[in-house]
């Protein structure tokens, strides 16, 4: 499955490890937050990078003290219409100031990419290759934004102030 | 009225191109209907029983004459010559072709309109008091805040995939005409004891399968905190609202299961963390939006309605229309005029292209070119000089738009029902038509007095039967249509959910049943001015029950 990062299809250096699977000794792995919480004592000593998957009904607060230990936090979109991960992403970025990778997986469709990116998600596991290839087009179709979010885009309220100011001079 | 600036124009144009691309991908098979569905729903395009249906947003029910003419044009060119005004102050076109929909949206964009967020599990078109800005009992203009909320909620990245649809209504008057107590969030503008302006925020009201009157989550919210507080409520709902059962997914169920105290705690906790952040609403932004809604340059005119109009003495039909269809205006010498879209035997809320154009012309001539759509599915000319009322009435009469039944038995609210809707179990339009014909005599309607009749063709309650003084709900039993009658519902400040009076009636019986209810009221009311709902509240359901079922 293609991974898009920095707007490009990229080799994925992380491996998802299911709860039933053994953890490899090295290599970057993404495990469930539950596994992290259960095996925390041993996992904090692991010498290779660890990321976690947050379930939709888990709060970033559940792992807040450990956020600096994670290279990736993966958020699940179990169905396109389940929007809880958008809130989780914003909380990670805006409230917990998480600076690592926030990744979307599950039902990640082309027409949601812009919403996801605005909420602070910066890596995307996209099922359809043609959707992954259309990434840049998909996030560039709209350029006017009516509310602040977790991205650096200027909301229209700020643009309007600038427009008036430049007009006045 | 709000006018698009360069940013709004650009946004809507981009949105149309995006949708054009999506439709193209659907038409050439890149997208399956399942994949296309969430995309079209974000642009108001439903698949109904017989065809696609396009629901166009009319923000807080405000239209210019130019926009109305465009709607008429769309009805004529892309549809069958008519449109249907809804209880959400929007308009629906019932017969567009999929391939035409991008062009329709482009035509709408030319007049600063769109179909965004008229469907899907997002923050829907914000509604407001239909008399906003002209009501005599207004504290502040709700359109200002409705517009601010509209903009904030537009393609909100966090709240576009909520557990379920989300409806917000705003009122700024002492009398609630926006039914704020039956919305997911109801906002009431008020002045607190210290003299500061702000809002009361109600949450968790709604109709549908589980009708609930909203509860107050915040007694007083300062204006600058409006968007921050809404974001806090939406965030709590987005995370905790149920997603396992579509019928339990509205915020009202969450508020009910958590209890209002716990829900308030959650919201206030989130609000405290967001407070003072980037959503703070500066006074300058409120002032900027307020400027779009500044009052008209009204003439100084004497109030003529007080002393009785000259023309009214000459024409009793005009007199009747004046009494039912006009409302006091905040400025002396002016009136608010309601145009009923409920002619005898007609389809509630339907308007032909010609009727839309006639209303647009009259708005230009008599009301600064502005029109409102009401949640009762009628139209309003907000700013008419009293001295023009007779001429306006004559013109309305010529177009067949002078039906004098606003707020009376003939002013029936009905959903599209089985004639159009894929969800409906029963017909509702023909039920409305039969009742309308039964009460065709206007003198009789006046004798009955204020009465709201609401009809829903299924339990989803789009005809708002729960809040009708007389509510009618269609249910299907063994392939037959039955209609349950509820009594005592009301949508005003004393919002109440009507109670089912007894077993349902067959399609052929329901008109008689409504008449029996009305006759019972007439014979039991304490005096002429005791309205139906007042009498019901005094008498209880017994006399009505007895009249309806004793003979059975």
Image: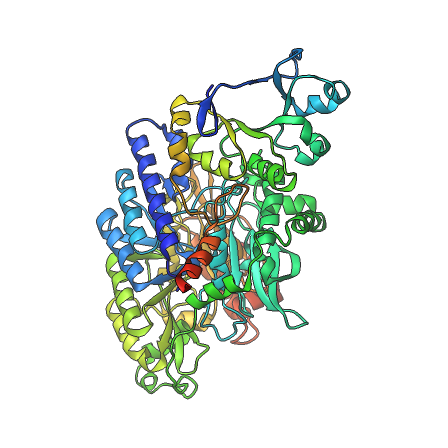
Query: Picture coordinates of residue A22 (x, y %)?
Result: 66, 11
Residue A134 seen in the figure: yes
Quadrant where the N terminus of chain B sits is: bottom left
* Residue at point 34%, 35% (across, down): B22
Residue for point 70% across, 23% down: A36
Q: Residue furthest front?
A: A169
**Residue B539 x %, y %:** 61, 65
- Residues B397 and B57: in front is B57
Residue B17's spot in the image, x, y percent? 32, 41
The single residue placed furthest to the right in the displayed view is A41
Q: In this rendering, is residue A165 above or below B102?
A: below
In this rendering, position of residue A78 left or right of residue B298: right
Foreground residue among B539 and B552? B539
Residue B246's place in the image compared with B295, above or below, is above
Foreground residue, B379 or B539? B379
Residue drawn at (69%, 24%) of the image: A34
Decide if residue B342 is in sight here: no
Left or right of B228, for residue B479: left
For residue B239, above or below residue B59: above
Across the whole image, how many numbered discs are drawn on residues?
A: 0
Name the residue furthest left.
B77
Locate residue B373, reporting x and y percent: 39, 61
What colouring style does the render use?
A: rainbow
Residue B297, image quadrant: bottom left
**Left or right of B391, for residue B244:** right
Is residue B365 positioned above or below B520 on the image? below
**Residue A78 occupies which quadrant of the picture?**
top right
């Amino acid at each position: 499955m293609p991974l898009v990062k920095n707007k490009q299809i990229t080799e994925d250096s992380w491996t998802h490890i299911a709860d039933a699977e053994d953890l490899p000794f090295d290599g970057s792995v993404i495990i469930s937050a539950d596994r992290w919480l259960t095996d925390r004592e041993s996992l904090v000593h692991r010498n290779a990078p660890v990321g976690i998957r947050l379930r939709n009904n888990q709060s970033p607060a559940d792992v807040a003290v450990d956020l600096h230990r994670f290279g990736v936090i993966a958020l699940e979109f179990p169905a396109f219409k389940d929007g809880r991960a958008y809130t989780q992403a914003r909380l990670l970025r805006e409230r917990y100031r998480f600076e690592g990778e926030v990744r979307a997986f599950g039902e990640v469709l082309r027409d949601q990419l812009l919403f996801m990116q605005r909420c602070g998600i910066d890596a995307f596991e996209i099922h359809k290759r043609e959707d992954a290839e259309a990434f840049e087009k998909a996030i560039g179709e709209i350029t006017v934004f009516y509310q602040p979010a977790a991205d650096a885009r200027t909301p229209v309220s700020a643009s309007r102030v600038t427009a008036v100011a430049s007009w006045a001079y | 009225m709000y006018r698009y600036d360069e940013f709004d124009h650009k946004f809507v144009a981009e949105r149309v191109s995006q949708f054009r691309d999506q439709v193209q991908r659907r038409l050439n098979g890149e997208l399956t209907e399942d994949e296309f569905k969430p995309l079209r729903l974000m642009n108001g395009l439903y698949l109904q029983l017989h065809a696609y249906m396009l629901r166009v947003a009319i923000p807080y029910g405000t239209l210019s004459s130019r926009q109305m003419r465009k709607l008429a044009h769309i009805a004529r060119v892309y549809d069958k010559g008519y449109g249907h005004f809804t209880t959400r102050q929007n308009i629906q076109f019932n017969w567009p072709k999929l391939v035409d929909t991008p062009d329709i949206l482009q035509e709408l964009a030319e007049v600063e309109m769109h179909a965004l967020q008229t469907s899907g599990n997002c923050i829907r078109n914000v509604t407001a008091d239909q008399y906003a800005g002209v009501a005599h009992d207004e504290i502040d203009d709700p359109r200002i805040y409705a517009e601010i909320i509209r903009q904030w909620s537009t393609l909100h990245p966090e709240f576009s995939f909520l557990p379920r649809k989300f409806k917000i209504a705003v009122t700024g008057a002492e009398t609630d005409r926006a039914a704020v107590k039956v919305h997911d969030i109801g906002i009431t503008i008020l002045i607190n004891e210290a003299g500061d302006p702000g809002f009361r925020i109600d949450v968790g009201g709604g109709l549908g399968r589980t009708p609930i009157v909203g509860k107050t989550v915040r007694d007083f919210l300062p204006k600058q905190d409006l968007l921050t507080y809404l974001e806090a409520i939406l965030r709590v709902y987005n995370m905790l609202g149920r997603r396992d059962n579509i019928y339990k997914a509205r915020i009202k169920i969450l508020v009910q299961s958590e209890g209002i105290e716990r829900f308030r705690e959650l919201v206030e906790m989130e609000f405290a963390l967001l407070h003072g952040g980037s959503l703070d609403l500066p006074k300058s932004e409120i002032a900027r939006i307020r400027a779009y809604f500044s009052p008209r340059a009204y003439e100084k005119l004497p109030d003529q309605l007080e002393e009785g109009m000259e023309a009214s003495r000459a024409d009793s039909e005009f007199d009747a229309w004046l009494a039912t269809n006009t409302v006091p205006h905040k400025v002396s010498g002016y009136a608010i005029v309601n145009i009923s879209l409920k002619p005898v035997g007609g389809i509630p809320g339907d308007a032909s292209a010609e009727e839309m154009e006639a209303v647009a012309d009259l708005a230009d001539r008599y009301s600064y070119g502005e029109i409102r759509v009401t949640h009762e599915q009628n139209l309003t000319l907000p700013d008419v000089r009293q001295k023009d009322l007779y001429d306006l009435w004559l013109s309305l009469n010529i177009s067949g738009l002078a039906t004098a039944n606003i707020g009376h038995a003939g002013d029936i609210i009905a959903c599209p029902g089985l004639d159009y809707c894929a969800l409906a179990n029963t017909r509702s339009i023909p039920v409305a038509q039969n009742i309308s014909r039964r009460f065709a005599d206007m003198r009789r309607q006046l004798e009955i007095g204020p009465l709201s009749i609401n009809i829903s063709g299924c339990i989803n309650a789009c005809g708002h039967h729960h809040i009708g003084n007389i509510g009618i709900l269609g249910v299907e039993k063994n392939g037959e249509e039955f209609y349950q009658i509820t009594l005592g519902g009301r949508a005003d400040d004393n919002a109440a959910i009507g109670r089912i009076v007894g077993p349902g009636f067959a399609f052929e019986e329901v008109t008689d049943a409504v008449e029996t209810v009305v006759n019972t009221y007439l014979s039991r009311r304490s005096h002429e001015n005791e309205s139906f709902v007042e009498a019901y509240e005094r008498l209880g359901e017994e006399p009505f029950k007895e009249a309806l079922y004793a003979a059975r």
